[in-house]
Image: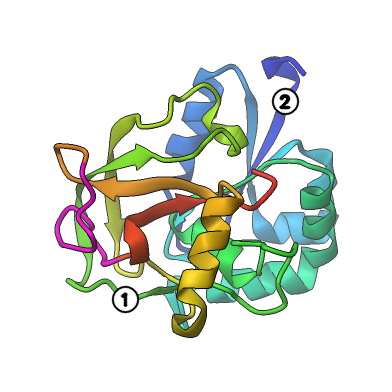
């Protein structure tokens, strides 16, 4: 498929932000991107008209209850079947910040056996409260994640973060089991690192939120 033939749905909701910047990033690549309010998508049931779905960052619905929880339940009840079909047909879904939290809340991530009926991961409060800083993260994937393209393994990039609930965690009683599955499935995409490329092992500020195993980003088993 040519870039100009790809159609991206950038779905927004009350409280989301950075969606315009993400739209511009896609447009700069020559990809047509549509910024649409989620209520319109719910009404028109046209999710499957698009090739890529993006949930942007921000504080959807004020992050009441939990980060991304209300928006996730709304998507689940209104377009849950369409989202499942979207994923099962191999179309990429991207969740950035709050969007990542939505994908965890809806059970699409980590997605060990497809969509989980209950979240298998959580994003608890940061160890040092709200964080607004630049961090470094390393690509640790072995090529499974479709969105990384030709980005070489070990590549380190600087990235701004601004969040109060970004700490990736796994259930304590199954932490090592799930971590092993993430490794085996090549689902680990990015990990926080220090300036020298070594892992902070949870230490702040290089790991801005105390995320387990310094995990900054994951994908599902299909990439």
Q: Position of residue 69 (x, y in %)?
A: 55, 75
Q: In this view, does 170 lie to the left or right of 144?
A: left
Q: Residue at x 27, y 44 (%)?
A: 160
Q: Which mark is residue 6?
A: 2
Q: Is residue 125 positioned above or below 204 on the image?
A: below
Q: Residue 44 occupies which quadrant of the picture?
A: bottom right
- Residue displayed at 52% across by 61% down: 180
The x and y percentages for residue 36 are 65, 47
Disc 2/disc 1 C-alpha distance (Å): 37 Å
- Quick check: can you spot residue 71? yes
- Segment tinted magenta in the rendering: 198-210
Tell which of 91 and 21 is nearer to you.
Answer: 91
Q: Name the residue under label 1.
A: 125
Q: Which element carries disc 2, helix, strand or loop? A: loop
Task: Find residue 42 and report its image quarter.
Answer: bottom right
Which marked residue is nearer to the observer: mark 2 or mark 1?
Answer: 1
**Magenta stretch encompasses residue 112:** no
């Amino acid at each position: 498929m040519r870039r100009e033939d790809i159609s991206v749905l950038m779905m927004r909701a009350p409280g989301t932000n950075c969606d315009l910047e993400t739209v511009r990033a896609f447009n700069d690549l020559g990809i047509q991107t549509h910024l649409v309010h989620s209520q319109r998508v719910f009404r028109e049931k046209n999710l499957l008209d698009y090739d890529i779905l993006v949930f942007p960052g921000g504080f959807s619905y004020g992050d009441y209850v939990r980060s991304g929880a209300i928006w996730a339940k709304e998507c689940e009840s209104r377009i849950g079947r369409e989202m499942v079909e979207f994923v099962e047909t191999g179309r990429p879904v991207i969740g950035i910040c709050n969007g990542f939290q939505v994908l965890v809340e809806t059970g699409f991530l980590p997605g060990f056996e497809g969509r989980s009926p209950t979240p298998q991961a959580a994003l608890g409060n940061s160890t040092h409260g709200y964080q607004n800083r630049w961090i470094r993260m390393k690509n640790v994937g072995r090529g499974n994640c479709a969105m990384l393209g030709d980005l070489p393994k070990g590549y380190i990039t600087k990235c701004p973060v601004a969040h109060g609930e970004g700490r990736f965690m796994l259930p304590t009683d199954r932490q090592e089991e799930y971590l092993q599955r993430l490794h085996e499935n090549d689902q680990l995409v990015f990990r926080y690192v220090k300036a020298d490329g070594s892992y902070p092992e949870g230490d702040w500020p290089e790991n801005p939120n105390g995320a387990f195993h310094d995990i900054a980003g994951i994908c599902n088993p299909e990439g």
